[in-house]
Structures are given as structure tokens and as C-alpha cells.
Image (cartoon, rainbow, N blue to C red):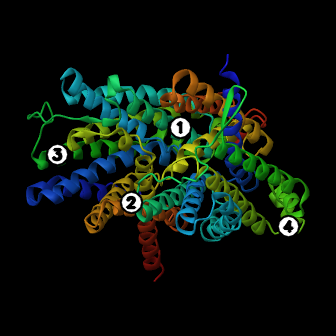
Amino acid sequence: MTVLPQLIVSTLLLGGIYALIAVGLTLTFGVMRVVNFAHGEFLMLGMYLALFAFARLHFDPYVTLVLSLPISFAVGWASYRGVMRPIVHASHNVQVFTTVGLSIALQNLALVLWTADARFLRTDYYAVVVRIGGAAFNVAQIVAFALAVALTAGLFAFMRWSYIGKVMRATAQDRDASALMGIDTDRVYAITWAVGIACVGAAGVLLAPIYPVYPTAGLQFVLIAYVAVVLGGLGDMAGALIAALAVAAVEVAGSYTIGTAWKEVLYLLLFIGILVVRPAGLFGQRGAEALGT
Amino acid sequence: MKAVAPAAVVFVCAGLAPLVVHDAFLLDSLVLILIWGSAAAAWNVAGGYAGQISLGHSAFFGIGAYAAGLVVTRWELSPWLGLAVGALVAMAIGLVVGYLSNRLRGPYFVLATIAFSQVLLIVGSRWRGFTSGSEGIPVPFRPGFWTLGIADKRVWVWITLALAVLAYLLQLYLDRSRRGYQLVAVREDEDAALSLGVPARWLKVAAICASAALTAACGALWAQYIGFVDPFYVFSVDLSVKFALAAIIGGLGTALGPFLGAALITTVETYLRAQFGGIGTRLIGIYLIVYGCALIVMVRWVPHGLVGWIGERLRRRVTARAET
């Protein structure tokens, strides 16, 4: 098996970026109990941000990454105030339709503004490949992986040690009790939503130099993120991290054995299988799906 | 709103319209409104009455469209047979999907249905040997009623009207029958309904099956009417959202609502396409932006849809009159 090292490396590189997309999604769900169906569209917006910053202002995508964090945080904050705030306590159906509506509106806004053409962000070091042992690494992928891991680690540290992170975890555990303890839950939701979007926006910037950019680019990645998030247990950040690697492994193994054309079917079937057999995920509590929480 | 009179007026007007109107464009719009209205009504059976919010219903629509297209192109049989095959296949798949996803609620059910329609999208667009892959299937026009090669749009109005009335009657049955009341009880509180001996599981599966079969019938007629099956359109999430949006605008869980919603969104869509389509294909997405915003606005401010809103107005007027 000379391909094995290559497969493992590909899995890790892919899994790192999936993890960054998935933790943002699962964080929003854990604290707000809202599944964000527009998550992929914010990824797409991040990709366009990197693309235009590169094409118009000649910013390297890794410079844009630093700028993208406050920008997507602000976009997230604004979308919370404008769209999500009134429906945080509404029924699931209202939440689902609101975020789906947001997704469609954003996707087609991009279509109208920037056309359906796939665009490419080509840096000078795009095609640089490093070989170590039997495996080849694309430099853009390695950098994306390293930064994604750093950002995910930063988010974990933020959740664990910062005051805001603790408040967010408290709200996730019991929103009523947190409100009684004097926590401004509305503010916590705004921050959570904005942090989730900042994560996925940053992931978009990291993906832009590797994948083509087009209005529905977010869909394929966010589907993977849903698989990872459900597999890890909705709302469980560590679970999402492990699950993202597992999904990446399935994808890499699938591309290798049955070809790239059908690999999506593989993880979608895996997804449906998990939903049917153990919807609470690998580490989640049984019965969460029936409570609809 | 359980009165049948408004619906009877709407359907009779639609049935008589071809005798008065001869404009091909208006008749074409009417056919599309009836097809989308029936599909929205089918969605409403699962999403509105049973509370099983699906965003993968385009899967069933696509199955119907492909069944009709393939039966005609591969075996040269009647599209009516394709319609029946599509409805049966969709029903069987609805049975499996409904059974497997039975205990999933809220966003989990939505995710499962989206994933399911995506699987069919990939199969439809990649299985070249059987479905012709991403090129889609051009459905040949062979004149005759049996082959559904009908150039006269008036006949199409009557065919699709029959489907619409069928969809309406199914909903009316749910509005008035014991089974319908049980289904609504399951939607409102499944545990309470179960404790009263309502066969919740069975009812939800049955609702999805009926909804799937009806959606497939819409897909089959649509494929024959339009003459082309494109996997990226018939299996798209946008199409599923369209069904849901029409039902939500008209009124979830109301029998006439989906048809009103479909009339509204089809009109808006046609208008926006005509307005902006000419400027360039890049503006084709404009009506979808309107869809998205309409969805956000409707679920927040008019959660009971047009039918609920109109009903509320009427009731207020009646009570105001009673007080004076």
C-alpha cells in the first residue's frame, strides 16, 4: 500500500478545513438551538471576499484571512440583528424556513451580482507541491490546514477560558437559568451567531485559493459540515472535530476506490444512515432528535 | 377555513377560463399555476397537515418526471403509464423514507430529506446509462391524448385542473375526517396523541406516501408539458423550497392555501422573468431573491398565510357587526 501515506495526508488536510466549517455550525446549534441552513452561503461570501481582495486590491488570501475575521463577525452580527433575533425563540419550522430563506436570498444575490461563472484565485505558489516520503502536499492545502487548525484551537480556547466563552457555554446548558443569573442571553446569541459566521467566513477565505468560487460553492462543503455535525452530535464541538476527520476519511477513501463522481453519494448515504440509526451522533445523548432540541 | 365555496368558485373559474380566454400566455400561466398548486398541496399534506417539514420533495417530483420521460423514451409507452409508475415508485420510496425518518423531528427531518434529494440528484445526473446523465431527457412530442402530445393548451388546463381538484379533495378529506383530525393531533403533540391511542407512526408514513405519489404525478405531467427533464432542476432544493413557499404563503394546513400561494408566486416569477430576463441571464436569480425574502417575511409576520389572514379579517368583521 504505497498510497496509504498519501490517503492519510489527504484525509488530515481535508478534515482540518471541514472541522473549521463544522465547529461554527455546531456552536450556533449548541447555544441557540438553531440549525443554520445559510451556513454554506457565508462560506461562499468568504470565498468571494478572498477572490475580490486578491483581484482588485492584490491582497494575499492569508492577509485577507486576518481582515475576514472582523468583517464576517460584523456581517454575522448584522444578520443576527436583522433576521435571526426575532425568531430565536420561535418554533423549529419558523427557524428552518428563516435560515433557508436567508440561504436562497444570499445565494442568488451572489448570482445576480457576480454571475454563475466559476472563478479562480491563482496565487504564485498555487501549484507548488512538497514531497515528503511517499506523499505529496500542496502548499496552499497545508497552509489552509495549519491555519484552520489554529483557528479551531483558538475557538476551543476561547470557549474554555474566556469569560464570554463561559457565558456562552452556560447559555447552551440552560438558557433560562443563565438569564436568571443576569446573563444577557440576547447578546450571547448575537455573539454566538457572529462567531459561527466568522469561523465559516475564515474557512471560505482559506478554501478560495484551492477550489473554484461560484454562488453555490458553499453547498457541497456545508453538506459535509452537516454530516460531521450530526455525526459528532449536534452542539458538541469536540464531537464535530473528530467527525470532520471521519467524514474526510470516508471521502478520501471513497474517491480512491469508487471515483470522485460517486463519492458524494457515499457520504450522503452515510449521513442518512446516521440520522436513521443514531441521530444523536456518536457522542450525543440518545433521544435528542426526538425531543427536537 | 373549512368552507368549500371559495375553492369551488376558484376551480370552476379555472375550468371555464379556457372557454373565454384564448391567449396562449395566460393559458400557459394557468397550467403552471395548477401544476405548482397541486405540488404545493401535495407538500402541504406532509408539511402542513402532518407537520413533516420536508425540503426534499423535489425528489418525488423528479421521480415522476423521470418515470414519465423514461417510459416514453426508453420503452415508447404511454406517459400516462409513466405517471402511474412514477406515482407508485414515489409511494414506495415515500414508504421507506417515511418509515426510516419517523422519529426524526424538526431540523433533523429537514436534513434527512435534503440529503435524500441530493442522492437522487447525483444518481440522476451521473447514471449515464439509464438516465442520460446531466444532459437530461428531451421528451418527444407525439400527437394524441394517449401519448399526451397535446398542443392545445385548453386541454392541458383541464388535465392539470383534474389533478388540482384531486389534491384539493385529499386535503379536504384531512380537514373533515377522523384520520385528518388525528393527523393534526400528531402534528401538534405527538406524545399526547400517542397516549390517546392515535396510530401516530402509521399516520405520518401514510401522509408522506400520499404526498409523494401526488408530487410524482405533478412531476410526470410537468415533464410532458414542458418537454424536457433536467436533473439539476427537478431534484433541486430550490424546487422543494418552492413547494413549501407556496404552501406557506397560502397557509399551512389549509386546503385552498397552496393554490393561492402558487398563483401568487407563479405570477411574480413570470413577471420578474419578463422584466429582468431580457437584460441578461445573470438577472435570472432575481425572483429567487424575492422567494428567499418572502419566506423570511411570511414565517415571521403572516405565519398562517393568506388564507389565515383573510379568515382572521372576515372573523373580525363579523364580530364587529355582532357587537353593534
Does residue B105 show up? no
Q: Quadrant of the C terminus of chain B?
A: bottom left
Is B97 left or right of B131, judged from the image as shown?
A: right
Give the amino acid at mark 4. Answer: Ile
The residue labelled by disc 2 is: B285
Q: Secondary structure at mark 3?
A: helix
Cα distance between the residues tagged 2 and 3: 28 Å
Q: Report the residue that reaches farthest toward the top.
A: A1
Marks 1, 3 in one chain: yes
Q: Earlier in the sequence, mark 2 or mark 1?
A: 1
Give the amino acid at mark 1. Answer: Ala
Whether the residues at callouts 1 and 3 have beta carbons within 8 Å, the answer is no
Q: Nearer the viewer, mark 2 or mark 1?
A: 2
Marks 4, 2 in one chain: no
Above or below — where is B205 with respect to B39?
Answer: above
Q: Secondary structure at mark 2?
A: helix
Q: Nearer the viewer, mark 4 or mark 2?
A: 2
Marks 2, 3 in one chain: yes
The residue labelled by disc 1 is: B115
Cα distance between the residues tagged 2 and 1: 23 Å
Cα distance between the residues tagged 1 and 4: 37 Å
Q: Tag 1, which chain? A: B
The residue labelled by disc 3 is: B156
The residue labelled by disc 4 is: A183
Is A28 left or right of B98, judged from the image as shown?
A: right
Q: Tag 3, which chain? A: B
Which residue is at 48% across, 37% downward?
B118
Marks 2, 1 in one chain: yes
